[in-house]
Amino acid sequence: MDKNDCLVSILCTAYNHEQYIRSALESFVSQKTGFAFEVLVNDDASSDGTAAIIREYEEKYPEIIRPFYQKENQFSKGIGYIYENIFYPHARGKYFAFCEGDDYWTDESKLQRQVDFLESHPDYSACVHNTTLHYCNGSRPDELLIPSRGDHEVLYENVIHGPIDAYHTSSLMARREIIVQTPDFYRAATAHGFADYAWALLLRLSGGIWFIDRSMSVYRLFSNQAAWTSGVDRQYDKLRGFVQGKVEMLRAFLPHAPAEVRPLVEQEILEREFELMYIEGRDKEQRKGPYRQILRRQSRSYRLKNFIKSYVPGLQRLYRRRQGYID
């Protein structure tokens, strides 16, 4: 395939996704388009049969599947390392589409619809769509990520709260020249193991993001022990690091934000600092300064617990031990 013939590069990260990777790859190669596309899939030294399934698709679709088989786990170097050192230098597409190996697409016209929009709207940096949430542990029935309300513009207030309030990464198609940028707020995010939040801010800063109200992907929650949704709950260090990363990223983003958006960013920083105080057991600090307003909006039971933990330290320590927080 000539570099100039490839319009879209699909970037797929895979790690111990033996149970799911076939669905993802099949959904990629099944796309019906009027242009050439490629699939860059990185197997990050999986210990199961993920690599064998990728090789099967590589043999069957040699013009589409471009795999990278790691002997040592690269995610340990940071999520930014995988994209900046493996995907970006080798991708040929004008546009990048994203999907992790345990998620998949459900509409064979997905790529064509998004390319059609971006080709005719050069002032937009990205195009996304609705996604179906599938709970692998059976805890809830399938549901739409965003309640149906028609095609629409993704607003700053949506992405500032986090991209999951606006779209899922499995729906993202972005312009290459924008997504490959690595501003300081992106670096702050990847240092804490995530990139999607920073991408959302970067893309919205660089242009519009258009949302197609059509579910064309599935986001699997609780898919395996390596999945984010399986690993953050009740893991103190991981949760604290993630929220710290949000705060650092938003602080770095603040000088870049348009003047009319900065109050939203500042409020989100306060909200995340408030959350971090709770995680770290600094409950009394939630009663001070601007955080008091956030505390007043919490439920009665939350406010009662805050009072007890703030003024009866013995009960606070007992509570944290029972919650699994070990300082």
Image: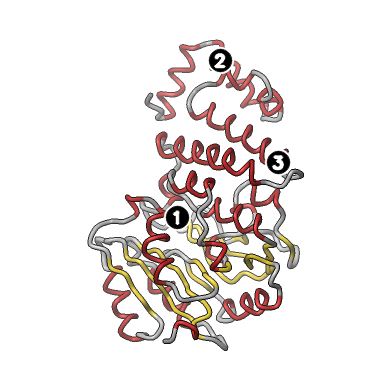
Quarter location, residue 288: top right
In the rendered view, tell whether residue 260 sits above or below residue 3.
above
Residue drawn at x 65%, y 38% is 268
List x then y, in percent, for residue 260.
76, 44
In the rendered view, tell whether residue 100 sits above or below residue 227.
below
List x then y, in percent, for residue 148.
71, 63
Q: Which mark is residue 310?
A: 2
In the rendered view, tell whether residue 51 sits above or below residue 255.
below
Instruction: Check disc 2 and report its element: helix, strand or loop.
Output: helix
In the rendered view, tell whether residue 237 sits above or below residue 35.
above
Q: Residue beneath label 1, please?
A: 137
Q: Which residue is at the front of the view, 253 or 17?
A: 253
Q: Residue beneath label 3, please?
A: 262
Instruction: Check disc 3 and report its element: helix, strand or loop.
Output: helix
- Amino acid on which the number 1 mark rests in the picture: Asn
Q: Is disc 2 surrounded by few (<14), some (14 to 19) or many (20+) residues within 10 Å?
A: some
Name the mark nearer the viewer: 3 or 2: 3
**Alpha carbon of mark 1 to alpha carbon of mark 2: how far?**
36 Å
List x then y, in percent, for residue 19.
35, 67
Name the mark nearer the viewer: 1 or 2: 2
